[in-house]
Image (tube, grey):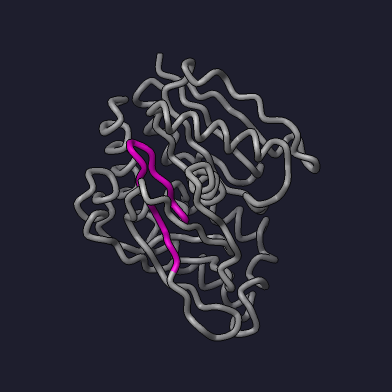
Amino acid sequence: MKRALIIRHHAKETLASNFRSVLDARGFELEPLNVFESAPIFDEFSPPAIDEIDLVMAFGGPKSVNDDYPAFHQEREFFREAMTRDVPVFGVCLGAQMMATALGGTVEPSGGYQFGLRKIDVTAEGAADPVFGKIRAPLVPTLHGECFTIHDGAVKLAYGHILCRDGSFRRINMSFRYKNSYAFQFEPQLTLEELIVWNNEFADDYKLMGDRFDPEEERARNLREFAKFASVHQTQMSEMLVAFLTNAGLD
């Protein structure tokens, strides 16, 4: 049986039903690794040996990859080894930032904060990519305030723009590929059911967007807009995950 390591950094950020159904249908055994269980000191990161797993999926959380936690340093080394040995990694949000720093990139505050649907600009390489190219409607749910650089050995698949708190716009990287691994500064796994939970659990995050936004208006708008887009998002993202598994020889 194929074995997938599922790394989570917050109890409310999950694999979600859309992605779980894809993995279940392909016979994956899911091995959970809940980094958040060692909060607040985050000193526990005990994954299986690299040669015992076929796939790594890492999701987001409110902490920064730059936080000086023992578990984060260990996780970064684990990602570096996995990608070096061609074990496919699918990194989302904090997971993507772990990948970026494992490859020698940097992560820093973007100057703003995004919580809601945002358009991404897909590069020519992203449009031609057998995995990322499954995204036909370039609109994605986001929840982040930091951004990453992309290592020279990786391929930029998409970028976007964020409205900074000072009123300026900044161009930020949104996705890259390194060998058979993919990083996403957005939430491909998100379902409507999970967003409803996030809208309550992370309600204070809307305040981080700055004075140009009303938190309650943004909260209502995000739910309203995603409710209309969720079926499209889930369809194309499940197709992307299937393509990712096929591209990695795991389908």
The residue depicted at 46 percent of the width and 29 percent of the height is 82
Q: Determine the residue located farthest toward the left in the rendered image.
A: 128
Q: Which quadrant, please, contains the N terminus?
A: top left
Q: Position of residue 95 (x, y in %)?
A: 53, 44
| Residue depicted at 33% across the width and 36% down the height | 180
> Is residue 218 placed above or below 17 in the rendered structure?
below
Percent from the top left, x then y, of residue 163?
Answer: 51, 78
As displayed, is residue 204 above or below residue 68?
A: below
Residue 193 appears in the rendering? no
Nearest the eye: 185 or 17? 185
Residue 143: give x, y in percent of width and height: 55, 60
Write the start and end of the magenta stretch as one range: 172-185
Assess whether residue 177 is covered by the magenta stretch. Answer: yes
Q: Which is nearer the eye, 209 or 100? A: 100
| Left or right of 131 in this view: 166 | right
| In magenta segment, residue 32 | no
In the rendered view, tell whether residue 248 sits above or below residue 209: above
| Residue in the image at 34% along x and 43% along y | 238
**Residue 242, visible in the rendered structure:** yes
Which quadrant would residue 130 be assigned to in this image? top left
